[in-house]
Amino acid sequence: MTILVTGGAGFIGSNLVNFLASENQVVVIDDLSMGKIENLDKSFNIEFIKGSVTDNILMKKLLKEKHFDYIFHLAAIASVADSVENPIKTHKVNFDSVFLLLELIRKYQKSLQRLVFSSSAAVYGDEVSLPKKEKSVIRPLTAYAIDKFAAERFVLMYSNLYKVPTSVVRFFNVYGPKQNPSSPYSGVISIMMDCFLKIQTNIEAKFTLFGNGKQSRDFVFVEDVLKALMLVSKSNSAIGEVYNVGTGHAVTLLDLISIIEKTLGFKLPVIYEDLRLGDISESLADISKLQTLGYKPANTISRGIDKYIKYLTSSNGYIFE
Ligand SMILES: NC(=O)c1ccc[n+]([C@@H]2O[C@H](COP(=O)([O-])OP(=O)(O)OC[C@H]3O[C@@H](n4cnc5c(N)ncnc54)[C@H](O)[C@@H]3O)[C@@H](O)[C@H]2O)c1
């Protein structure tokens, strides 16, 4: 199979690419604004293109010249805060690139088996009912969430009107190896882990907790996300459908800290600050729709954290199950 992964040098993308490359030819396009080339295994099965998914000429050439069996569109400015700062810039990546890709697929990719678009639980916004079902109220609050939802609708419309085989996944809070902790708005577990590892190597570090720590999230280990992506991309009944990707269990940030403290055997110094504007207090996925495709998350939070720590502290790397 030949597979295109946009944003394939990023956190979820690189885990997916390295997994797929054992048996497939994988083409990666990434502008390296957040991703890193080192995230990708050195493999003859991986072709890396440094470029932007917003570059019409480059994308047209790529989609016209190569034939893909599957496309995973993961490229995005994944920071909600960046979308608040720079809504026009992020709109170009988070929405326009999806529209462009859909048109190019319609024109040039007649044998595509599936486009999987990565959306986000952010589309549900601050509507309070839990757990979130795919049919729950949508109330996107930021440019990031609005772009994701608008892109979702186009992705589904191309399936309905033009018979482009598409599916949408809404990721909850994904964590695991290769998540970049460099921004204060990166995934909270990667920032926490970064702090823990600094302390372990005697570098002074403190974790800033916004709010009282009782806010909860559905944290899903990236290994389970890959399983979800495989199920959704291979299942015919997933064409034209949207799926939540989470675990169906929520964990508070205070619980999370205590799980990591127990595993590592020392305390995390915490500074408490006010809740950030727009942060929601609770998030939880209803994963029953994804379960109908055979999805069963294998990693509880403790198990996922354990694997993540092994990856960060072992020089042999970490091999997914
Ligand atoms: N990590 C999560 O918890 C989470 C939750 C919900 C949704 N998502 C979505 O999943 C996808 C992957 O997220 P991630 O956590 O791996 O983030 P990430 O930032 O690690 O990956 C995104 C990748 O896209 C690349 N990119 C950005 N702009 C680009 C452009 N114009 N052209 C080409 N590449 C570009 C970045 O360099 C990066 O490698 C994103 O679409 C994100 O919105 C992630």
Image (spheres, grey):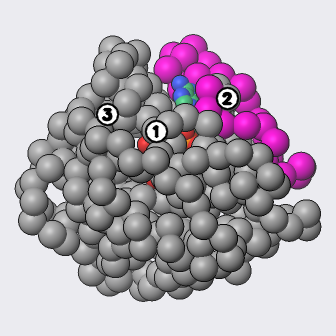
Distance between the Cα atoms at labels 3 and 1? 13 Å
Residue 32 badge: 2
Quadrant in which the C terminus appears: bottom right
- Mark 3 surroundings: few (<14), some (14-19) or many (≥20) residues within 10 A: many
Q: Nearer the viewer, residue 256 or 106?
A: 256
Give the residues drawn in magenta, as a range.
33-59
* Secondary-structure class at tag 2: loop
| Viewer can see residue 193 | yes
Report the side of 239 relative to 227 (left or right).
left
* Secondary-structure class at tag 3: helix
Name the amino acid, label 2: Leu
Which is more N-terminal, label 2 or label 3? Answer: 2
Corner quadrant of residue 177: bottom right
Which residue is tagged 1?
Answer: 185
Q: Position of residue 271 (x, y in %)?
A: 46, 47
Corner quadrant of residue 137: bottom left
Q: Position of residue 50 (x, y in %)?
A: 71, 26
- Distance from mark 1 CB to nearest ligand 1 atom below 8 Å: no
Above or below 50: residue 272 = below
